[in-house]
Amino acid sequence: METDEQSLAAAWQRTTARHALLTDVALPPLAESDDELDEWAESAEETGDDRLFLMLDEEGTVHGRLGAYHERFATRDLDEVVYLIAEAAMRQRADGLAEAADLLDRIDPAWGRRFRGRGPEETGTAGVCGRDPLEGLAWAATPWREQDPYTHLAFFRAAPGQRVDAEKLALVYGADPAQVAGGTRLRDLKAADDGRTYWDRQWKSCCFGEAGGWTYLLHHDTPPGGFADQEAYAALGIREQVWLSATMAKAIYTFDYIRDGHRVGDGDGGTLELSPYERGYALHPRGGELEFLNRAVRRAELDHPELTDDFQLYFHALEDALGLRLPRQEFAEGEVRAAYWAGGVAEQ
């Protein structure tokens, strides 16, 4: 059945009649156009109104916006819209995400599971993480915001059962062959000439290795005027790439996920800019290619309320969803493999 204003109102009325916690929740304001929705959003920003606003287009798609900018979605699924209205209402009523999850449990256990980070098609309850996130990838999130240990954190993965050779990857990207062959470590670079050489040249260094099934290559600047040996690069068998970049001076932080040559994402398909966000809101469009990260972030929020840094939460979600890791102890002790650039860099 095509969604229209009447069917939307009827679906919400049926839902509120079945659930006592929703009897006093009205259907959110329904705009008649994008312009009207934008006007409401501007007003919401001025007044601090964080209600859910809806807009129904001519094709029967319901568009939603929370407050001024949060969590936009677009769907023709009435059940999806009903759930999102209920979620927004319980989130406003609750004191924290855990209580919001409990309230949704009372309305419908499937809704509670969904809010905790399970997809709508999944059953069962997501298990508690049980790990210290700061012993996984999350440890690197806070220093990374200041470009430490490196500006660019790049991860590469081959087909299942195969691996991307870390030494070959570093060489393709321009690492010094002698240092790669000699097994140079980060502590070796820092110790040379009492550290003065590293102080002067650290922006022309890289670190590399393997962890969690991924091969990582971390660096600041790349060799000027260099280009990759495309045959050698193709021979690495790379199927997936994740790029995280931080530009401290401009406070710009980006995420890029490429799988089988396709940039995974929504909208214009460009690199995504990361920014601090309000807990409990989806970072990426509902139902989009990065919905799996929304679920992983929600699980991180509920499992680790002790994490106060949004980037730590996001990094832990990347570890949970994709398996990305960096060996914290190896970096702390300078045991991670390292080299200076000798020239040449693969194009992203």
Image (cartoon, helix red, strand yellow):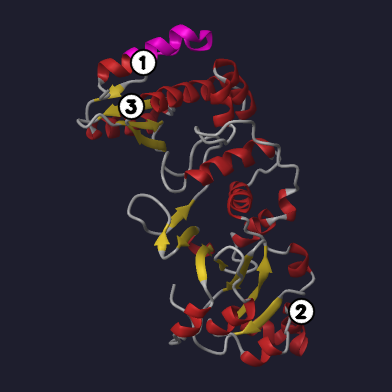
Specify which label sits upstream in the sequence, 2 or 3. 3
Q: CA distance from mark 3 to mark 1?
A: 15 Å
Residue range in magenta is: 10-26
Badge 2 is on which residue?
187
Give the left or right position of residue 88, taking residue 187 as reference. Answer: left
Task: Specify few, some or many for label 3: CA neighbours under 10 Å numbering under 14, 14-19, or 20 or more.
Answer: many
Specify which label sits upstream in the sequence, 1 or 2. 1
Q: Quadrant of the N terminus?
A: top left
Three-letter code for the amino acid on which mark 1 is drawn: Ala
Three-letter code for the amino acid on which mark 3 is drawn: Leu
Q: Quadrant of the C terminus?
A: bottom left
Specify which label sits upstream in the sequence, 3 or 1. 1
For this rendering, which residue is in front, 62 or 280?
62
| Picture layout, residue 39 above or below residue 267 | above
Badge 3 is on which residue?
54
| Picture layout, residue 323 above or below residue 112 | below
Helix, strand, or loop for circle 1?
Answer: helix
User: Which of the labelled discs sits on residue 11, or is there none?
Assistant: 1
